[in-house]
Amino acid sequence: MLTKTTFFQPKRLPPVSCPNPASITVPEFRDTFIQTLETLYGKPLSEASNREKYEALAVLTRRFISQNLIETRKRQNSEDTKQVFYFSIEFLLGRLLENNLVSLGLRDTCAEALSQLGLELGVLIDQEEDAGLGNGGLGRLAACYLDSMAAMDLPGHGCGLRYRYGLFEQRIIDGNQYEYPDNWLKDRFYVWEYRRPEEKQLVCFGGNVRIQTNGKTRFIHENYERILAVPYDVPIVGYNNATVNTLRLWSAEIETANHTCGLYGSDCNNVIDYKHSVESLTDILYPDDTHLQGKMLRLKQQYFLVSASLQNIIQSFRLHHYDLSILPDKVAIHINDTHPALAVPELMRILMDDCGLGWDEAWTLTVKTLSYTNHTVLPEALEKWPVTMLEQLLPRIYMIIAEINERYCRELWNAFPGDWDRIHSMAIIADNQVHMAHLAIAGSHSVNGVASIHTEILRKTVMNKFYTYTPDKFSNVTNGVTHRRWLLTANPLLAGLITDAIGPEWIEYPCHLTELTAFKNDAGFLARLSDVKATNKLRLANYIKAKYNVVVDVSSIFDSHIKRIHAYKRQCLNVLHIMHLYNLLQEDPQADMPPRTFIFAGKAAPGYYKAKKTIKLINMLADKINNDKRINQRIKVLFLENYNVSHAELIVPASDVSEQISTASFEASGTGNMKFMINGAITLGTLDGANIEIQGAAGPDNIFMFGLTADEVLNYYRHGGYNPWDIYHSDARVRTILDNLINGFFPVGPDEFRTHYDAFLYHGDHYFLLKDFAAYVEAQRRLAGSYRQQDNWQKMCLMNIAHSGWFSSDRTFAEYAAEIWELDKPVPLWGTPI
Ligand SMILES: *Cc1c(COP(=O)(O)O)cnc(C)c1O
């Protein structure tokens, strides 16, 4: 059996000297690449596989990074400025090679050097596995923030878990989703990590707590299970600067085998079993972003992340400072959603049990150090853990939580004497469950939502009682995405066009994109903008032809709906509309409508029955439409399998239309919407999440909005919903489509889509698809008409790009840095969307 050390130990670096990236010439790059490859594999270029060429190129690129990594660490320690640690259970990095080449200013040099060798950079880039250590938006957001922190030269680091298997690989067979393990590390080495066994931490589970009361009361945790946390550092390369921050990912290992043999009996076979059981702690990422309560292993992962990270942070803090009282002046710790909320009791434990502080001082420091972002109002996603599970797995931590709860409730009692209902609904422990959001709110000095409407909803509904109690804790920081990955790297043609027009300042200061508005009536520029889109569409069309053997019309509207498959994201509303168009064309094959290509991609949680049936529905619809000769050229439907960051980078730059049609009030922010905007796609959206701010920035003429408002939706819920049968009976289009779900329209059994049918008609259409249907059809009709006026359409695209700078994560990060973490380094603030 392979042990982890032989398995993951990076191969020794080749002894080649490496020139400064800024000054390396094409011939030097070419020769160094060949040397690197020969040193790594002992074979000539002509015999190397593409994978080996990729690895050689990545190792070469890493050599440009490592010196800056060392220097940055040294500098950040000696400058003694405040540092931020971003705790997140997910980091959805995607690939790193191309992004790193771009950050180092080497992409063109590299492409030219490779082409002199008859190689194509794109082919080698495609050899890299996506680091898929996240489910979707939340994990991708964390990755965008790392990029912005490094680009802005802020001392900030990510703390996460090194899952052996990332989010599952999705394959579509006969229209159904099947899940395969995402073995991203395989037996190869992952070039972008440094294993740092010397910085390992010990994390303790189970056991019991003995209370020693002679003299000062002490809590002694004993008989626990010890699991090693070994860090792997992924360098995060700043754009065009010398900063390289780190993402520290923890991996679970057993203590040395000898030691374990002694501890767990003489039978070393048991040790192997035991080793596997310990390492399984960081084996898998849970593939569901909503239903996670009750899984012991998940709770273990959460504690493992916060305990290893906090011990590590406090240790290095104490190396540099004697006095813990200045902890909040030197360290900010951010909790990304509630998954790392055990940071509250764990920091208390370390400060009290390990460092000897008293409760009050430890509490003040904890609250001042921690801040928390809420990401969702979905009730099923608000984490709660059974008291018994916490008591058993983390006895000392549970004691601390119980004490926090008691003091918090007492404080509430003083503020609202006699108001038992209020105190019960705000308590951290209630009904034998620990409410993680309540714990995070009580233990942080700052709580923020991720788009202005989301924060309003938090204030008004789910967190209203906390907001009225401590209004100053609450703020909004609208999400952002890194324009360097999503525009500069993913869409080099558009980036080049922009730089030609307004110079390169936008890359470091994306607010400069507004200068593009000067070109809104420049026919030549708009024509070039249109050419860029056409080229990107052709690239996607070629991919679709090669992989799915479907020919799509590149002059059709590329309308993309790509994100996790979830009822609230309403992929089914899109499906209803396509069925409607299909029915129209059946009745009148000459009907006047521009050709459209509908592109879907996204994964469903493996246990989410209805979402998986939605995937089946989309694929059945695609089969039916794509094979119907009568309408073939007017509509195409595609479901692209295994949606991940790399696929998003391919699809987004090629899209004309961005579907952001969640039921109003459900999508906290969305970030997909921003990626499309900066690539000049037109949003077709509801008044939900950041769509509202996108509308504000782009202007109402440059976006298609429709449907119920969040207030209307919430109001319906307060009054028990609405009656979908009224719409079924009054709108013949709806009646036909819904009947099609169960009447043999699709070549499947009558019950295949029964869940969908029943959800619409018998379960109150909880997500208001039928209610929004007419408005959606109308918005699609307006949009299609508008696409025909190509001059105006290109102008709309331009206005979106020009006003997308505000949605850069650089802006988001500046807000966090200045207002929540109070970092020393001044950052430019932007104010409201421009
Ligand atoms: C941006 C992104 C998401 C989030 O998309 P939303 O439309 O905001 O839900 C999910 N998955 C991947 C791979 C992404 O790149």
Image (cartoon, grey):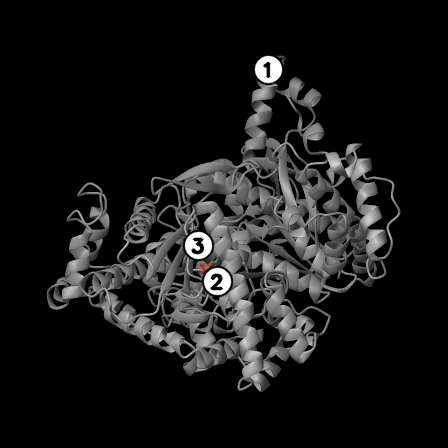
What residue is at 68 percent from the left and 42 percent from the top? 231
Q: Are marks 1 and 2 in contact (CB under 8 Å)?
A: no
Q: Nearer the viewer, residue 505 or 653?
A: 653
* Residue 791 visible in image: yes
Q: Nearer the viewer, residue 563 or 277?
A: 563
In terms of sequence position, does the residue under pointer 1 or pointer 2 come before the other? 1
Left or right of 522, for residue 796:
left
Residue 281 image position (x, y, % from top left) = 55, 35
Q: Which is closer to the viewer, label 3 or label 1?
A: 1
Quadrant of residue 495 within the rendered picture:
bottom right
Q: Which is closer to the viewer, label 2 or label 3?
A: 2
Residue matched to label 2: 672
Q: Nearer the viewer, residue 177 or 150?
A: 177
Residue matched to label 3: 428
Left or right of 138, for residue 50:
right
Q: Is mark 2 within 8 Å of ligand 1?
A: yes
Quadrant of residue 468 within the rendered picture:
bottom left
Q: Residues within 10 Å of mark 3 (few under 14, many from 20)?
A: many
The quarter of the image holding the C terminus is bottom right
Q: Please, is residue 445 above or below residue 159 in the view? A: below
Residue matched to label 1: 269
